[in-house]
Amino acid sequence: MKSIYKILLITDNHNPDGGGAEKYFFTLKSALEKQANLEVYSLSFGPEDKIDNNSIILKETAKPLLRYFWRLFFNPFKYQQIRRAIKRINPDVIHLHNVKKYTISLLKAVRPYPVVQTLHDYACICPTGWNLHQNLQPCATGLHTDCVWQHRRDLNGIVYLGRLYAFLRLKTLLKKIVKKFIAPSPQLTNYLEQNNFPAPYYLPMFRANSKPLALENAQLRHFLYVGQLSPHKGVVNLINEFALACQSNPKLILKIAGKGNCEAQLQAKVHALKLQENIFFLGWCDPEPLYEEAMAVIFPSIGLEAFGLVITEAMRHGRPVIGSDRGPTAWLVDNKKTGLLYDPLIPGNLAEKILLLAEDKKLVAEYGQNAAEKFNNMMGNEEIIARQMEIYQSVMPAHPPLVIPAHSPPVIPA
């Protein structure tokens, strides 16, 4: 009987400083490495080939259009390269995360092994990953035959058909290859169940432990956005609503920490609205001091999120969240208790919430304390890693005995 088991974690981008999915990937790897009977490896893609003791990075295609082509179609060279890398490790379990590069080739390469996958978005539920209809309302079921064209959003018809083909092929392959799916929110778990994905399992993100930040350092009228600057994050709408709020309170401040493909467009919008003294772009930076000075964190996503790591970060710091009333955001934020929810499709709704908290430290303190208490009642990291190892054990042939840390039943927020 084996005493050491090998776990191979696979994701698209080898970037520990990336978004929530990348942070979770490397946090999970670090947590698994602390388990006595596991050897943990990672496989990902980057600008150059690189191999060390427990990490393999394969060089990705430089041209974006060609990368997208190989996402849709089988690449025999990349398949052989991935297959050799996996054979070099010879894992007992493969744990997939984002698989949006060389998707077909990668899935065929992992097929001989026990495979589990953590989903970090809605890409296996919706061709665009947003899970929204044309009217920007969330789809209640994920793509079905009666709402195929409602998921198109503003995409060209031919481009959408390409996305639809890739989506259907991905969905079919995942159901054949992956033995267990892991979702970081009950909402995404429910979508997986509705779409007949095998054995979906709810397991939240890891959380950092610290005391809430003191409120005396929070600056009146200061707000914070942390995350990618991409269309589904709703930052365009955030800037429009912040401009509207500034008409009533010209001293409002918004700091935007993050980067993305919409950054130039967003900066141009701020200039056009003459808000350079109110809205500041900080790029990727350490957000810790930004949480301390903020009255509240704004989470304006239009597309459905798989979890919302920034929300729990704000809760951990004792700061309320103003969030869009959809998906896991509405699960994490208790309206008028730990923060405020707004409808992103109602003009002025977000501006109203911003103005409500802008100068009311008493209300901010109340919401922030409630948020910190809710955060502390969420599933702890020991529980998360124990349940993760139970999942690995369940897909291994003959269920070999992993040493699983003792844990108590989880406390799941309502």
Image (cartoon, rainbow, N blue to C red):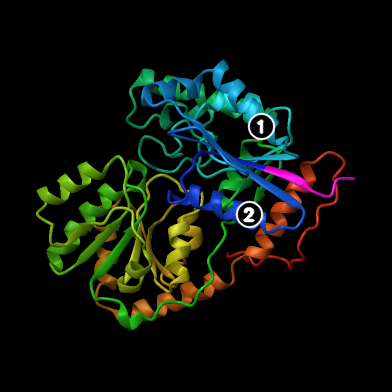
Q: Residue at x 39, y 71 (%)?
A: 319
Q: Which residue is mark 1?
A: 86
Q: How many marks?
A: 2
Q: Is residue 327 above or below residue 57?
A: below
Label 1: how many residues lie within 10 Å, few (<14), some (14-19) or many (20+)?
many
Q: Earlier in the sequence, mark 1 or mark 2?
A: 1
Residue 62, horizontal then vertical, whole percent: 39, 27
The local secondary structure at tag 2 comes to loop
Q: Amino acid at mark 2?
A: Leu
Q: Is residue 179 above or below residue 412?
A: above
Residue range highlighted in magenta:
1-7
Left or right: 332 as drawn, with respect to 362? right
Q: Amino acid at mark 1?
A: Ile
Left or right: 277 as drawn, with respect to 123? left
Is residue 221 part of the magenta span, yes or no?
Answer: no
Left or right: 154 as drawn, with respect to 111? left
Left or right: 29 as drawn, with respect to 321? right
Q: Is residue 301 above or below residue 98?
A: below
The quadrant of the picture occupied by the N terminus is top right
Quarter of the view holding residue 243 = bottom left
Q: Which residue is mark 2?
A: 203
Residue projecting furthest to the front: 52
The quadrant of the picture occupied by the C terminus is bottom right
The local secondary structure at tag 1 comes to helix
Q: Are marks 1 and 2 in contact (CB under 8 Å)?
A: no
Q: Residue at x 61, y 46 (%)?
A: 190
Viewer-side label of 1, 2: 1
Depth check, front residue: 16 or 370: 16
Residue 374, horizontal then vertical, whole percent: 53, 71
Residue 15, horizontal then vertical, whole percent: 46, 45
